[in-house]
Amino acid sequence: MSAAAEPSFRPAVQADLPQLYECDPYSRNHESRRVELRRVVQQGSCLLALVNGQPLGFATLEYNFFGHAFIPLICVATAHQFKGLGLALLVELERLCLTSKLFTSTNASNAPAQRLFARAGFTRSGIIENLDEGDPELIYFKAVPRGAQPADPSAQETSWGKPQAAA
Ligand SMILES: CC(C)(COP(=O)(O)OP(=O)(O)OC[C@H]1O[C@@H](n2cnc3c(N)ncnc32)[C@H](O)[C@@H]1OP(=O)(O)O)[C@@H](O)C(=O)NCCC(=O)NCCS
């Protein structure tokens, strides 16, 4: 990625939803995905990547995976893939992550995502059968250096990605 094309990041807001749908073709045909995107945006858990001010990708980060951070979804607009934006999003999420263990996952059939996660330093961490028929879910893990974060996540100045209070 050239210096001029360095991405910037900010939490996605409701007004960004049409751009999120643009980045995520699946959402255009699946109301359930649009509902999910509205939820994570409202919750403040969706990070938008912009290049030259244009939203070209996003990723979500939640803290609901056995108490650890989990990236359920990362998407880069089709025309802008293969330019390092997916990797930049993962690096930024790792920087923002408030827990020492960061997980993500993808289907066994999704070679681009597997390549991306390996490139970002994630390692395989198990497999879940029976989610999508005939297409197991591969779990990926990366240790996050504790030195990069405050000792007490609740002391973080920004609320972005802050673990949800226990119900
Ligand atoms: C997965 C995805 C986010 C990758 O985004 P991206 O911006 O293209 O990724 P990057 O440009 O940062 O590439 C990172 C690595 O993945 C590789 N990669 C990216 N797309 C690839 C593809 N289609 N086939 C093979 N490798 C691919 C890149 O070559 C790079 O590896 P390298 O540096 O060793 O060559 C993007 O393909 C996407 O949005 N897919 C649809 C949504 C999805 O499946 N999300 C993942 C599961 S939630």
Image: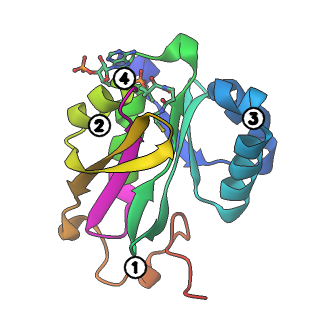
Q: Which residue is mark 2?
A: 117
On residue 30, which mark appears?
3
Label located before the other in sequence (1 or 3) = 3
Q: Secondary structure at mark 2?
A: helix
Task: In this rendered view, identify the residue nearer to me: 54 or 46.
Answer: 46
Tell me which residue sits at (38%, 45%) in the image: 105
Q: Which residue is mark 1?
A: 153
Label located before the other in sequence (3 or 4) = 3
On residue 112, which mark appears?
4
Q: Secondary structure at mark 4?
A: helix
Q: Amino acid at mark 4?
A: Pro
- Assess mark 4: CB under 8 A from ligand 1? yes
Q: Few, some or many C-alpha atoms within 10 Å of disc 2 (few <14, some 14-19, many ≥20)? A: many
Q: Please state the horizontal and vertical placement of residue 1, each as a whole percent of the image.
A: 35, 18
On whether residue 91 falls in the magenta region, the answer is no
Label located before the other in sequence (3 or 2) = 3
On whether residue 99 falls in the magenta region, the answer is yes
Label located before the other in sequence (2 or 4) = 4
Tell me which residue sits at (58%, 58%) in the image: 45
Q: Amino acid at mark 1?
A: Pro
Which of the two marks, 3 or 2, is nearer to us in this view? Answer: 3
| Image marks 4 and 1: residues in contact by CB distance under 8 Å | no
Query: Horizontally, is 107 left or right of 99 in the view?
Result: right
